[in-house]
Image (cartoon, rainbow, N blue to C red):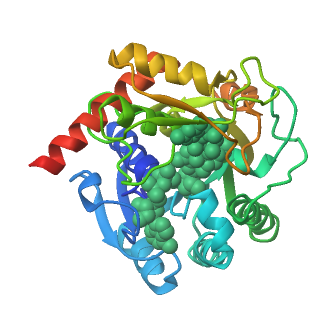
Amino acid sequence: MAVLVTGGAGYIGSHMVLELLDAGEEVVVLDNLSTGFRWAVPQDAAFVAGDVGDQALVARVIEEHGIDSILHFAAKIVVPESVTDPLGYYFNNTVKTRALIETAVEKGIRNFVFSSTAAVYGNAEAPLLGEDMPLAPINPYGRSKLMSEWMLQDAHTAHGLRYAILRYFNVAGADPKGRSGQSTPQATHLIKVAAQAALGQRPHLDVFGTDYNTPDGTCVRDYIQVNDLARAHLVALRHLRDGGECAIMNCGYGHGASVLEVVDVVKRVSGVDFEVRLSPRRPGDPAQLVAKVDRIRRLGWQPQHDSLEEIVDQALRWEKALAGRKAA
Ligand SMILES: NC(=O)c1ccc[n+]([C@@H]2O[C@H](COP(=O)([O-])OP(=O)(O)OC[C@H]3O[C@@H](n4cnc5c(N)ncnc54)[C@H](O)[C@@H]3O)[C@@H](O)[C@H]2O)c1
Ligand SMILES: O=c1ccn([C@@H]2O[C@H](COP(=O)(O)OP(=O)(O)O[C@H]3O[C@H](CO)[C@H](O)[C@H](O)[C@H]3O)[C@@H](O)[C@H]2O)c(=O)[nH]1
């Protein structure tokens, strides 16, 4: 039995591949390299360059490799880009996911684990977000993912395809062994941007909004370390393989940090007092997103890297490694 990881050349997918290989699984990566990197896929995984919407290709890969489960990471992920190019997002994230689900059903795939996002909750105001809260995404990215969630649930009802939907909160950090990290050149994620500022790769860091209804006025997020997130998928996959029920599960730590707290940790861990500018709000940012995480914990998942200091240290190390790679 082999596992197909779509988007396995990307940030989270490449960490998933490492976790699967470490667990002794046979892994096949399918990625069109639109934002991923061929070098991010470990040698021990088979690599197929191609698109998840290419049904003939996916069917062939499933047959040739004896795939029993699909972990579907491939997507476009930039929220502001989804606002200016909604149809591109619905095509890549929703239409192609529909094609992938159809192929999975036709080929008798047993388990399907899907990368969803806290963006499906929109501007929910509760201190902790539970999976059963009303869903009201406020941008095309979130909607493209929510539609995929619905398709999976309907495909389960109609065709028996078994799914686990994981809603990630803010993913950060890098493999502690230095094998992978967040490599996207123009990434907008706070911890990556702050690490780049600390290393002198950016002139300063903007704090987007200081007048939110939060303890220090800046936005609060639940940062989850990327290997911990990958292990949550492993736990979900084993649950499905063992005959467990289909599930929708948040992935976070259940506590948040504000933008200013993150900046403080990056300054402390790097030892660099980089310039910080207090700037206006960035459109579309909810004040606070913190996960309720009892569901994934009930399956036996336990975080191993629940420390902002550790996550920041990993991000800094990875930025240095990337800079070395570029200079070489
Ligand atoms: N990074 C986060 O904080 C975050 C938060 C919530 C959810 N997610 C979800 O996690 C998943 C992975 O995100 P990431 O941060 O690793 O992004 P990423 O851009 O690094 O990885 C996405 C990968 O998918 C590939 N891809 C995209 N469209 C494809 C297609 N049609 N066919 C084949 N390959 C395709 C890209 O080349 C890339 O390697 C996405 O589904 C994203 O929506 C990410
Ligand atoms: O240079 C920066 C970058 C970010 N921020 C702030 O830091 C917080 C976190 O921002 P990120 O861009 O790191 O992450 P988001 O919370 O916007 O979004 C992330 O989580 C979402 C779900 O919560 C989606 O899944 C999305 O894909 C993923 O990038 C926000 O308040 C943002 O305004 C800054 O102040 N300065």
Q: Residue furthest left?
A: 328
Observer able to see residue 167? no
Seen from the viewer's position, the closer of residues 138 and 100 is 138
Residue 81 place in picture, x, y as percent = 59, 65
Q: Does residue 224 appear to the left or right of 50 in the view shown?
A: right
Residue 174 place in picture, x, y as percent = 38, 34
Observer able to see residue 63? yes
Q: Does residue 107 appear to the left or right of 180 in the view shown?
A: right
Seen from the viewer's position, the closer of residues 275 and 29 is 275
Identity of the residue drawn at 80% across and 48% down = 122
Q: Is residue 24 above or below residue 52?
A: above
Q: Residue furthest right?
A: 134
Q: Is residue 190 above or below residue 45?
A: above
Quarter of the rendering containing residue 320:
top left
Residue 302 place in picture, x, y as percent = 57, 22
Quarter of the rendering containing residue 124:
top right
Total marks drawn?
A: 0
Identity of the residue drawn at 70% across and 66% down = 144
The quarter of the rendered structure image containing the N terminus is: bottom left
Seen from the viewer's position, the closer of residues 186 and 173 is 186
Identity of the residue drawn at 70% across and 42% down = 281
Residue 297 place in picture, x, y as percent = 67, 25
Identity of the residue drawn at 44% across and 25% down = 311
